[in-house]
Each structure stands twice: as structure tokens, then as C-alpha cells.
Amino acid sequence: MFEYFEGNYTWNMAVNLALGMGASAGDLDDACRSLRAVARNRDDAAAEQWFDAWHAVGARLQRMAQLDESRGRRLSAAAKYRRAAIQFVQAERMQSAHFAGRAPVYAAMLECFGKYLSLAGESCERVEVPYEGTTLPSLFVPAQRGDNAQGPAPCMIHFDGLDVNKEILFMLGMPQALARRGVSTLVVDNPGVGESLRLRGLHNGPTPERPAAAALDWLGTRREVDPKRTGIMALSLGGFHAPRAAAFEPRLACCVAWGAQYDWGVVQRARAQDAASSLPVPHYWDHVGWVFGVQGMDAILDVSSKISLVGILDRIRCPILVVHGENDRQIPLANARRVIEECVNSPKRELYIHTLADGGAEHCSIDNVPLTCEVISDWVAETLAA
């Protein structure tokens, strides 16, 4: 993994994530150069300096994009709006849930991302999926069909993880990789992430089959989608969400865990006991409590114990792919092996390990996203081709 900051796994993960979304190396260096002196501090002051630095570069790009747009330079404006959205989303997601600056920067990210889609002419539709009295904000990316293609296309429901959102997933390129292979994607801010958490007040929980069912119901209204060839995928904590949904929602035609989970409660208890744990975001326990709508370590560990695939994987009766990095410093590779071993009733169960020798070996292959996009999109297209 590219390690810009010595001894700060969390910040290095954020840099790699930004690069995976298409950030300019120059933008990142402008944001990060001054942060090297405080990278080892890992305190609130350092996190707020991160916010200021990344926000400043985002604001600069937004101003430049607005100037391009005023001159009619749509494509140049779109590219800068995209880069601004990357800077803003990384400034926001690295802060405490209670940090006052989060809300306006998140709003700026949504605005810039929307401008990017519109001006670039991206084939991506913002939609609202009805869910338990409210909606799940989502992005629908249709399959690219050849001239001879007939009938509705297969589709993947794509859930988030613990600390990412639908805009990040779109910019990482998975929906586009699937579209080029004739598969549509519905990228969902499931409860506990993105707009569903920030603007709808929806918290995560141990029953992801409920939002998965809502997504399937909505896709059933789209003529271009084949309901019999619709699967689910998710990354990071979504390595629980996707298999759990597949175990309890028989309409799902396949499942992909982009980074495995098995028993998240065990992982959480180990993290609580090890101050040197590799964590995805600063203010980690504060963030987890926000995602699940609980307060205090006891409550966090209690809900974490319910995020488990133990004893249910034999219920999965659709094809399943688990993709994991050999050097994943957050979730040990043994979790991926355990998941595949227990999917005994799946007609097609596969484990793909990104090795150190080939690349993409870190958590969710964030150190080499194109590799995992290719592996997953090829498998999905082949699996749903029938």
C-alpha cells in the first residue's frame, strides 16, 4: 500500500481510497504535505487539521469548476467537480460524528458530485428506494447493451460498508465495470451510511435483508432489470450485509462479499483491547456508535455481537464470491476462508485472494482497486449470464 504518512494506517487508507476514486496526486500532495508533521498525533487537533487541509483543496477545485462552467467548458468543469467531491468526502468522513463542520462539507460533496454527473453526461440516475416509511437514496447505473441485446439485463444491488457511501462506490468504478459487462447496478446508501444516516436518521443493524428486500421491490418496477438475475454485493462491513441478505432473501441470484466478515463482535472486542489496531477512520468508537445509534462501549459491543454470520451461511443457496486481501490488516484472511467453508449449500462458492505478489492485498484491495473491480465484475457477469 502507498504509505504517504509514516506510522498512520488510518490516514494512509484514506489517501489510497482517494486515489482509487480518481484523485489527482497533486491535489493529494497539496492537502497532505503540511499534515506529515502531525500524522503521528492521532488526536482531535490532528483530525481537524486534516479537515482544514482537504477542505481547502476541495474548495479551490470547486471554484475552478464553477469558472469552467461559467465559460461553457462542461467537461473540464465536470472533472474538477469530481475531484472536489473526492476532497470533500474525505474531509468529512474522517471527523467525529459531532464535528460541526461535517454537515456543510457533506452538502458540498453532494452538490459537486451531482454537478459532475450532469456535466460529464454520466449514465447514472439518482433514485429514492421506498423503505419503511422513508427512502434510501441510491444511484442506478444501467447496463451497456449491444445492438443485439434483447430483454432485461441482470443487476447487482451494491450496499456500502461502515464508513463509505454511494458516491465513493461510484467513483471507485465498480458500477461502470459491471455496466461494460452488461450488468446494471443499484448503489444504495443502506441504513447507517451516507445520506441514509446523515439526512434520514437511519441506523445500521443486524437485518440487512430488510433494505435488500426494499431494493429488490424497487428494481421490480424497472423494465430494464431482470428480477431473476439480480444479486447483491457490498464491501468491508458489507461483507456481513451481503451474505446475511442472501441467506434470508431467496430472490437474490448471487452474492459478492468485497472483503469478508464472519463474526464482527470478535473483531470489535479485539480492537477494544488493542490500542494499536488498524482502524478505518479516526474517532472509531464514536463513529461505530453513530452508525448503529447506540452510546457507550458496552452498547457498541452488544450490537457488534449481533453482526455475525455464524450458523446461517448454510442458508445461502445462490452462487457466492468472497474477495479478500492477503495482507488485510483490519479483517484477517481466516474470516474469508471460514465464510466459504460454511456456504455448503451454495451451488458455486469461490474465494479469490489478492496476494502481495499480485497486488490489491490490503483491506478491500484499496491499494489496487482496478484489480478487484475486474475480478468481481467478471465473476458477476459470468454468473448472471444464463
Image (cartoon, rainbow, N blue to C red):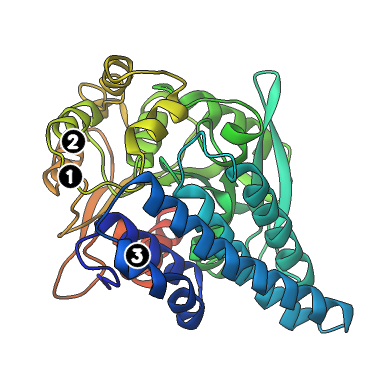
Q: Amino acid at mark 3?
A: Thr
What residue is shown at x 32% (from left), y 21% (from top)? 300
Q: Are marks 2 and 3 in contact (CB under 8 Å)?
A: no
The residue closer to the viewer here, 303 or 127, is 303
Q: Is residue 47 above or below residue 340?
A: below
For residue 129, side relative to residue 233 (left or right): right
Q: Position of residue 366 (x, y in %)?
A: 33, 63
Q: Amino acid at mark 2?
A: Arg
Disc nearer the start of the sequence (2/3): 2
> Disc 2 versus disc 3: distance between alpha carbons?
26 Å
The residue closer to the viewer here, 278 or 245, is 278
Residue 57 appears in view: yes
Name the residue tied to disc 3.
372
Name the residue tied to disc 2.
271
What residue is shown at x 58% (from left), y 55% (from top)? 167
Q: Is residue 237 above or below residue 30?
A: above
> In the structure shown, which secondary structural element does the residue marked by tag 2 occupy?
helix
Disc nearer the start of the sequence (1/2): 2
Dividing the picture into quarters, in which one does residue 59 lie?
A: bottom right
For residue 253, side relative to residue 308 (left or right): right
Q: Residues within 10 Å of mark 2 (few under 14, many from 20)?
A: some
Q: Amino acid at mark 1?
A: Ser
For residue 365, side relative to residue 126 (left or right): left
Which one is in front in this view, the residue at disc 3 or the one at disc 1?
Answer: 1
Q: Are marks 1 and 2 in contact (CB under 8 Å)?
A: yes
> Disc 3 versus disc 1: distance between alpha carbons?
25 Å
